[in-house]
Image: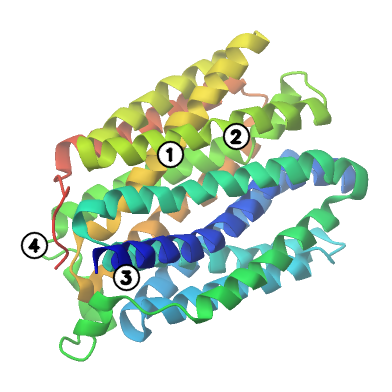
Amino acid sequence: MKNKKEISSRRLLGIAGMGWMFDAMDVGMLSFIIAALKVEWELTPGQMGWIGSVNSIGMAVGALIFGLMADKVGRKNVFIITLLLFSVGSGLSAMTTTLTAFLVLRFFIGAGLGGELPVASTLVSESVPAEKRGRIVVLLESFWAGGWLVAAVISYFIIPKFGWQVALLISAIPALYALYLRMGLPDSPRFTAVKDKEKISVFQSMRNLFSKDYRRQTTMLWILWFCVVFSYYGMFLWLPSVMIMKGFSLIKSFEYVLIMTLAQLPGYFTAAWFIEKFGRKFVLVVYLIGAAVSAYFFGAAESTALLMTSGILLSFFNLGAWGGLYAYTPEQYPTIMRGTGSGMAAAIGRVGGVLGPLLVGNLVAQQVSISTIFMIFCISVLIGAIAVFVLGKETKNTELA
């Protein structure tokens, strides 16, 4: 029986992880596509910032709407809808010839992506044993690094030679296969158990987030999500472009970002090990502080050696913290409002994801130094760490309600 449960957990991890990986491929390639579109469409820094921000606006809307839907129609159904929305939008965006059309499709792609991530982590959290839950959710998040890695490889070899359109088509096609696999996935056993017994309205779920029982968790999560997403999208969507600003060629910047991306994998795997040994708060606080210090040195780096070292550490700590974030968030709420709570926290985070790339675009246009820009992100990540340390409660080995 135990072995059967383990096989089921591995299958769930594999199927959910595939969708996660293809989503990451899209977001990862977007950072390289922005750099390519700057040249092809002669974009201004402000227009470049809007591409990343419209994607995040879609993610905010998707996280909110699909998070609420997950508590009404089930985790699996929303899981399927969001990946379908992402796949179709990604394929169509390869055919655009104007910035306006590209931005409209990026909104819908973002909505699918923003809805999938919190719902996927909720489904996995509710489907695995408590003693493995944190590790498995962090391993789910590690598929994000795999997607970024594939995105960096595709961008390095495909975009310069065949164009960004081919890269987008490559990302859309395999996502349809993940959609096929997902059809046979069972829904969350916890959701199935409570869906007919406990029913509350969407508005009641939203009100409950700031009731006496959940006010502290909600405040902590909203601060944490905003700070992490603001800094992540501000830094990583601009990473290839920042490398170019520091004097590297388009090809060389893609090469260096590919190397930095490799560091995401050990970041996830160490976080997956620590999260069950030392707890969620430990992983989040330590990895966020590591990300903040790395961001400072990356922005201030003048030598290639310091740039690469700090960039590698930035990837390591930042993505390890993301793993902890997705493991920690669903554990803050009971089943009847878990999708709503996770989705709204993610939606607040995506507001930060809108502001981050826009801020960088505007500051670059005003010729503000890269070191100053990355100092802003350093402070943002530290605020997130303080929120977890002061307001967060440890949830290691806690049975979900």
**Amino acid type for the residue under numbered disc 1:** Tyr
Residue at 64% x, 71% y: name it: 177
Q: Nearer the viewer, mark 4 or mark 3?
A: 3
Residues at marks 1 and 4, CA–CA distance in whole angstroms: 31 Å
Which comes sooner in the sequence, label 4 or label 3? 4
Can you identify the residue that label 4 sits on? Answer: 213
Q: Left or right of 46: which side holds 226?
A: left
Determine crowd level at label 1: few under 14, some 14-19, many 20+ residues with C-alpha closer than 10 A: many
Outermost residue toward the left? 212
Residue 365 shows up from this direction? no
The residue to which callout 2 is attached is 261
Name the residue carrying label 1: 268
Horizontal side, residue 190 vs residue 178: left or right: left
Where disc 1 sits, the SS reads helix
- Give whichever of 251, 144 is nearer the camera: 144
How far, Cα to Cα, is label 3 from label 1? 24 Å
Spatial CA distance of label 1 from label 2 is 12 Å
> Where on the picture, by quarter, is residue 255?
top right
Tell which circle, 3 or 1, labels the residue nearer the N-terminal end.
1
Q: Position of residue 202 (x, y in %)?
A: 28, 81
Q: Position of residue 385 (x, y in %)?
A: 29, 34
The residue at 79%/38% (across/down) is 156
Q: CA distance from mark 2 to mark 3?
A: 30 Å
Task: Give amino acid for label 4.
Answer: Asp
